[in-house]
Amino acid sequence: MSPSTASTESRGSGSPCGELDGAKAVAAPAAAEPTTARLATVGAAVGGYALLTNWLMVHAAHQPWAVALVFAPLLALLAGAAWQLRSRALAAAVAGGVALLAWVVRSGGVADIDRLYVLQHAGFHLALALVFGVTLRRGATPLISALALSVHGHLTPTMRDYTRRLTAAWALYFVAMVAVSFALYALAPWAWWSFFGNLLTPLAALAFFVGEHVLRYRLHPEFERVTLHTAIEAWQRHQRSPR
């Protein structure tokens, strides 16, 4: 067999298996590109929304249209979650929120809109604390343990203990953000709270996520490496799994 013939056969020319391997090689980058673009789009949208919200809260906090611009995207996200989870209770809560928002806009706003923004921030973080916290009850699987199990397929006792403590750490983090929010609202100028609530809040969550990711592999080098894409896919599978 000549080198040229071996080279041709090794590429799988005319072989279904070779064609399949070639298709996989071509499809892998193509699948990664939309994911990267989608993450970049979401990140840009979140960043733009945070900047817009901060400007509105500082310069037009008492305007009815500003209230609509701040709260409508959150209600849209909750509506999407209600649809995905098929949750009638969440759908009813979203409907109530839409009705309340329409009433506020129609009536010309409220007297102390700043407090409403603070309560929105607190309610969002307390809801997240509850989502993480309820999975720590006896007999339940901690949220991050469930995500890790979806990624790795199995968990060692060390991994189970670590993911349980990490779930508790995230729950405490969300509660701490509420405490800082209330303290700033009570003691600092409104512009300070707006800067914290709209800009520092997402940056702090990102710093917590990245810091934990780095620390995890320093403390537990035996953990398998997981990309952000893999983590997002695990979360999506967890959301779609039967409750």
Image: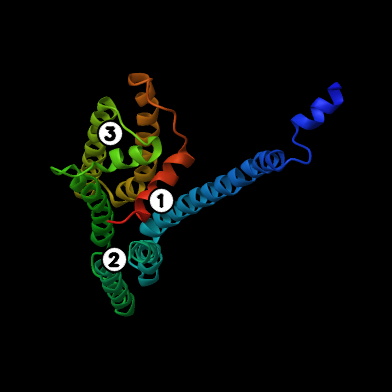
Q: Is residue 195 left or right of residue 9?
A: left
Q: Nearer the viewer, residue 162 or 118?
A: 162
Can residue 225 be seen here? The reply is yes
**Viewed as shown, does residue 240 lie left or right of 166?**
right
- Residue bearing the label numbered 1: 236
Amino acid on which the number 1 mark rests in the picture: Gln
Provide the secondary structure element on which disc 3 rests: helix
The CA distance from mark 3 to mark 2 is 27 Å
Q: Residue 91 appears at what percent x and percent y?
A: 30, 69
Q: Which of the pair 137/71 is nearer the observer?
A: 137
Query: Taking 229 as reference, is 26 left or right?
Result: right
Quarter placement of the C terminus: bottom left
Q: Could you classify mark 3 by the number of other residues whose Cα lies within 10 Å: few (under 14), some (14-19), or many (20 or more)? A: many
Q: Which residue is mark 3?
A: 163
- Tell me the residue that label 2 is attached to: 87
Q: Residue 236 versus residue 104: which sits nearer the camera?
A: 236
Distance between the alpha carbons at the discs numbered 2 and 1: 16 Å
Residue type, label 2: Ser
* Residue at 84% in and 22% down: 1
Q: How many marks?
A: 3
Q: Residue 39 appears at what percent x and percent y?
A: 51, 47
Give yes or no for contact between labels 3 and 2 (Cβ–Cβ under 8 Å).
no
Residue 101: where, in percent of width, then height? 31, 72
> Above or below — where is 100 with respect to 202?
below
Q: In the figure, 131 relative to 7: above or below?
A: below
Q: Residues within 10 Å of mark 1 (few under 14, many from 20)?
A: few
Q: Secondary structure at mark 2?
A: loop
Looking at the picture, how far across and down is residue 165, in whole percent? 23, 32
Do we see residue 183 in this rendering? Answer: no
Element on which disc 1 rests? helix
**For the residue carrying disc 2, how many other residues have a C-alpha within 10 Å: few (<14), some (14-19), or many (20+)?**
few
Q: CA distance from mark 3 to mark 1?
A: 18 Å
